[in-house]
Amino acid sequence: MEKTIKRIGILTSGGDAPGMNAAVRAVVRTALSCGVECVGIRRGYNGLISGDFIRMDAGSVSHIIEKGGTVLYTARSEEFMTEEGQVKAVATCKLLGLDGVVAIGGDGTFRGALALARHGIPVVGIPATIDNDIGCSQYTIGFDTACNTAVDAIDMLRDTMQSHERCSLVEVMGRQAGYLALYVGIATGATAVLIPERTVDLERDVIEKIRQARLSGRTHYMVVVAEGAGSAFDIAAQIKAGIGLDPRVTVLGHIQRGGSPSSRDRETATRMGYQAVQCLVNGNPNRVIATKDGKVVDIDIEEALTMVKPFPMDRYNVLEAVTSHNH
Ligand code: F6P
């Protein structure tokens, strides 16, 4: 006999991402529409351990769809990685009568959710990270907004680099992934893009591209560097040593994590939040919500954590083909 879902918890964990609030809102509103109560767990898994919660009704999630960050706060929990921490978290779930937990975040969040599942708490994960580097999902909440933020910043940088005929080195986020860098590099017409998925050959990937740009008449250059591919400052120093330019370095940093979520992030997060609640109320728990070919799907959580998605390296060829100095 399937247990009727009466109350669920929801938490955000790991690095925040624009659109998390849209997902929280969708989970709460969908749950209420199914007659299920919602309890917001604050500060990620630390909140489950300490019993840091807030009851959530329809009004709790009004006017948050357009807000970056997470109204539930977030954290990375060392204690939850221990069996003792997990036991405390499960005790909170039982004390609050949580029949399920929706966990919004990245791979680490899903590993935590799996630990809860193994202790008998039904869970569903929702992928949210600006890195877009979750193996089971083609898209993760926050990526589009972060790209737009980086593109706007680089467009502004290009103005001044053009005026001063300078070389700009821009470091973007993406802990160990080049999705942001490659997407933004294509969208801004960068001279060169360095990503961790492609071994950096400075002469081939930067110096020669700048030379070709100069030979084609350009006098300013934009180099986008994924933080996982190296330090923009180190690369700037090598450019200076190699060809005498004096690059200006901009590390975009955490500005890429903020801002009002884009329409794509709001809409995708809403569909994911809806699907997460459907999994729980329809007796289909221990899943991770994902997108596949534009559709929102759900995948067994253990399988999801083993999945690897191929990096779209063919897009690097697109970048090379359309970079003006390659002709
Ligand atoms: O995982 C998202 C991310 O923004 C990465 O791109 C970045 O390297 C990391 O988080 C920064 O972590 P923190 O916010 O803890 O400094």
Image (tube, grey):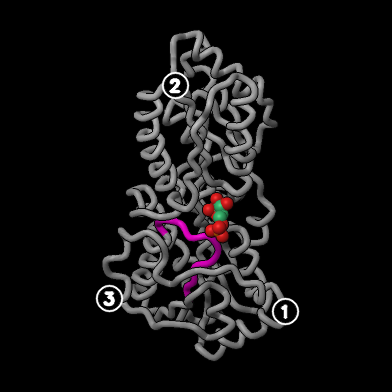
Amino acid on which disc 1 is placed = Glu
Horizontal side of 35 relative to 309 (left or right) equals left
Q: Residue at x 59, y 23 (%)?
A: 206
Q: Mark 1 points at which residue?
A: 83
Query: Circle 2: is it few (<14), some (14-19), or many (20+) Cα within 10 Å?
Result: many
Q: Tag 2, which secondary structure?
A: loop
Mark 1 vs mark 2: which is more N-terminal? 1
Is residue 33 among what the camera can see? Answer: yes
Start-end of magenta stretch: 9-19
How much space separates mark 2 and mark 3, taking CA atoms?
51 Å
Task: Tell me residue 175's x, y (percent).
Answer: 60, 49
Question: For mark 3, what is the residue?
Answer: 59
- Name which residue type carries label 2: His
Counting from the top left corner in percent of width and height, residue 97 is at 51, 87
- Decide if residue 277 is on the left or right side of residue 132: left
Q: Is the magenta stretch mostly helix, strand or loop?
A: loop
Kindly state the secondary structure of the residue where label 1 is placed.
Answer: helix
Q: How crowded is mark 1: few (under 14 residues within 10 Å), some or many (20 or more)?
A: few
Q: Nearer the viewer, residue 225 or 302?
A: 225
Which residue is drawn at the image coordinates 47% and 18% (left, top)?
322
Cα–Cα span, label 1 and label 3? 36 Å
- Point out which mark residue 162 bears: none
Q: Which image quadrant shows ligand 1?
A: bottom right
Magenta segment includes 8: no
The answer to which quarter of the image holds residue 150 is: top left
- Residue at 33% x, 79% y: name it: 57
Mark 2 — residue?
220
Picture layout, residue 287 above or below residue 121 = above
Q: Are marks 1 and 3 in contact (CB under 8 Å)?
A: no
- Residue at the image position 51 percent from the left and 37 percent from the top: 249
